[in-house]
Amino acid sequence: MSGENEKPSLVYGEIKDNQNVLDLEKITIMKSAVDSEDVRMEHKIRLNQNGDDTNQTIKLYKRRWFIVLLFSSYSLCNSFQWIQYGIINNIFMRFYGVESFTIDWMSMIYMLTYIPFIFPVTWLLDKKGLRVIALVATAMNCAGTWIKVTSVRPNLFAVTMLGQFCCSLAQVFILGMPSKIASVWFGSEEVSTACSIGVFGNQLGIAIGFLVPPILVPNIEDMDQLAYHISIMFYITAGVATLLFLLVVMVFQERPELPPTQAQATARCISPEQYSYTASILRLLRNKPFLLLILTYGLNVGCFYAVGTLLNRMIIEHYPGEELNAGRIGLTIIIAGMVGSLICGIWLDRTKTYKQTTLTVYLMSFVGMLVYAFTLSLGHLWVVFLTAGALGFFMTGYLPLGFEFGVELTYPECEGTSSGLLNCSAQVFGIMFTICQGKIIDNYGTLAGNIFLCVFLFIGSVLTGFIKSDLQRQKANQLAKATISRNPGCKMPRNQKGISRESSS
């Protein structure tokens, strides 16, 4: 993909002598309490395991942008299907002859499937890497879309549920990847932006899921015509999923030839014998700041899942016949959230103020939810659009913040494992909040249901203030830079023969 004389897109350093190897051992000391007596363990990883003078270079590759955009695309296709039933809940109820709560499960199955499968999937990510996970994810997503194509008959609800289950299983392989791709492919000054782009695809898919189904599947009485419109939507989704699967097979790459950061350079030197997935999980569960983040992330994102799943019911209750505008309001939530995600990602890369930014966005999510709750019933759709946009900007914008804060608190543990635990918490709270808020709405109305979510967002905001901001990944990169600047064996590269170049693979 690159010419022989192509220059690296970032100035990089070289580490070549044994003294550097000794200095850089400091970077990889992982301190963790391993028992009740708070015994400390150390994992020392040598950058040059063979003890020779082989150069270790860091470099950024242009293809990193294609990798993250391809991931965002198949994440988009998968997340679109999360909400495609829920946003036209009343139409699918009538077509399949089932209750509203049953259609709610077409969204909640995404959350339920995640919980038991996340640990084997993160283990597989650790053992087999990004490419295998990407292949399985797109294959499962593709299979699910074609199963749903065959389910467009009123008596085949079980078949469409099976297709949705396959897509929900694919989601387990997708949600933990943004921070992993960002760390493996991107430099320390752009890793948060890259993670935001990865999350961006998921959010855009949800946005399209809010907007497109009400357009493609109108609320009509003729069941044959309704089946025709549903099949059009399913065929389009299946075609896109198939194309993305083929692209992943042909071009998705495991990792760059050379690492993008010193932190990744040291992480690559961890041999399989030195790494234990079970021990990694136990270390994460002993990390008190990360445990608090797991709880607060679950509360915030669980509220977002509940709002998205029940949006159609809330809007239709106050604005009957406005299925199309319910989708547009959902679109507004997600588009505003995508803007918030990108802004937060860029802000983190520039300032590294992880806790301060996370706390601010969390508090604003609480305020946004409060305003949305009390303005929903005013009878003015433009007000709902405005307040829903403000809510989405902060609540959806929080997603990449949680991922990146988690990676910082847990480095050098696998990014996929930390992201998986965060997402697992979100799915658990998402199911709980969706069921509870749905029951509250049925019995007491939408205001009571939304205030129920406000209470938990306030609790999450308070708990976020207690998270200790111990940024391990930033410390590792800073120590590496300081070591290189002090040691005369480290030098700036020259554009000459022998300097590493991008491989054509």
Image: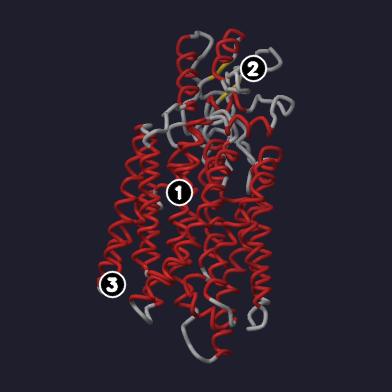
Label 1 secondary element? helix
Label 2: how many Cα within 10 Å (few below 14, some 14–19, many 20+): many
Report the Cα–Cα distance between label 3 and label 1.
28 Å
Q: Which residue is mark 1?
A: 299
Residue 407 point in image, percent of width and height: 51, 35
Which sits earlier in the primary sequence, circle 3 or circle 2? 2
Q: Residue at x 57, y 72 (%)?
A: 102
To which residue does mark 2 refer? 46
* Mark positioned earlier in the residue sequence (3 or 1): 1
Q: Which residue is mark 3?
A: 381
- Under circle 2, the secondary element is loop
Three-letter code for the amino acid on which mark 3 is drawn: Leu
Label 3 vs label 2, nearer the camera = 3
Contact check, label 3 and label 2, Cβ < 8 Å: no
Residue 327 falls in which quadrant of the image? bottom left
Between tags 1 and 2, which lies in front?
1
Image position, residue 5 (x, y; %) = 54, 33
